[in-house]
Amino acid sequence: MSTEPLVSVVCLCYNHERFVTEAIQSVLNQTYQNIQLLVVDDCSRDNSVKVIQSLVNENPSIKFLSLSKNQGNCRAFNLAFAEVRGEYLVDFAADDVMLPDRIEKQVRCLQSADESVGVVFTNADYINTEGKFIRNHTHHLVTKKLIDRVPQGWVFRDVLKRYFICSPTMMIKKKVMDALNGYDENLAYEDFDFWVRASRNYKFVYQEDTLTRVRLHVKSMSSSWYERGDKQLHSTYLICCKAVLLCRDTDDKNALVQRVRYEFKQSVFSGNSSEAKLFARLEKELAGHNAAFFFYRLMSKLPLPWPWIRRQYYRWRYS
């Protein structure tokens, strides 16, 4: 029996028949051997189940959960989490690819870290549907001046203020997820809520290694950010409301205000008026309205195609 810590990998699949074989094989081909692999198909409408079942037949150690009703990412993960036995945990999408030494390097990092560390995350390369390189995660954020460094340690304020963690790269101590009771199933997505809640009590460590290839395509959840009626945007509002109760001092609250004001602006110019009103109300409760609030509200009343303008600007500025 291996004396190495068991690592549980929960691989979530939804309509990923084109990519799921490569994803699962990348876990099976890890240099680290003590792995529990759980694959969950969230009621795919393509042939994902047949593809996965074929792989399970060849690799009986894989635990396969085929859901008869679509549950969404948070609920599907939690169903698999009930089966997790590992000391460490990876939430892995069935359209991404692990490099062979990813798990080994992350286990070594967590083993050498102090007890206050709960999460390690790394750099990543983004790829297209054909597996061709698009960009590097950290290099892109630094080049576009979205960050000047990757925060680590006690990152509660950092995760409130800005995006910098590529969530598919995380390895998490199971005790962290246990303390959070898994993901919040009332939300449309999981990572921002996880970062906020976990970073309150645990440190995050960054490894510069590029250990995962993250696939971008039109069916990715990230492709629907800030579209009209975006359910993820409403979840962001709910997470910000939770964060209010987690703030311990003025600096924490100021970090949250920065996020709320950003999301208000995005809501206004993406045409999500209901969320704009919610974020405006939360901003007023936290800090009162600043001059930017009144400027954005005034601009939004001009008869211009703001969602289209916003999309074009962000493609030019951040692509």
Image (cartoon, rainbow, N blue to C red):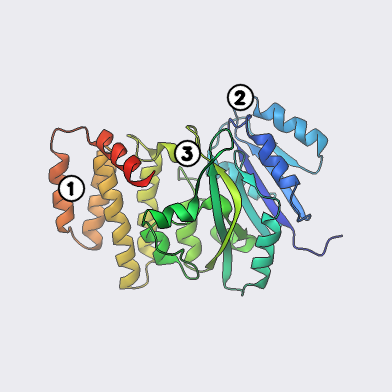
Of callouts 1 and 3, the N-terminal one: 3
Residue displayed at 65% across by 35% down: 20
Q: In this rendering, is residue 28 above or below 181?
A: above
Q: Is residue 295 left or right of residue 176?
A: left
Q: Which residue is mark 1?
A: 296
170 is higher (above) or lower (below) than 65: below
> Residue 73: x percent and y percent?
54, 41
Calculate the distance from the C-alpha at mark 2 to the C-alpha at mark 1: 43 Å
Q: CA distance from mark 1 to mark 3?
A: 27 Å
* Outermost right residue: 1
| In-image side of 187 versus 100 (left or right) | left
Is the C-beta separation of discs 1 and 3 under 8 Å?
no
Classify mark 3: helix, strand or loop. Answer: helix
Is any atom of residue 66 visible in this view?
no
Vertical side of 115 occupied by 319: above or below: above
Label 1 crowding class (10 Å Cα cut-off): few <14, some 14-19, many 20+?
some
What amino acid is found at the position of numbered circle 2 in the picture? Asp
Quarter of the rendering containing residue 248 = bottom left
What x and y, as percent, mark residue 57? Answer: 81, 33
Residue sitting nearer the eye, 98 or 160? 98
Amino acid on which the number 1 mark rests in the picture: Tyr
The residue at the point 42 percent across, 60 percent down is 159
Q: Which quarter of the rendering shows the C terminus? A: top left
Quadrant in which residue 276 is drawn: top left
Q: Which residue is mark 2?
A: 46
Can I make out residue 25 in this image? yes
User: Which residue bears the numbered disc 3?
Assistant: 221
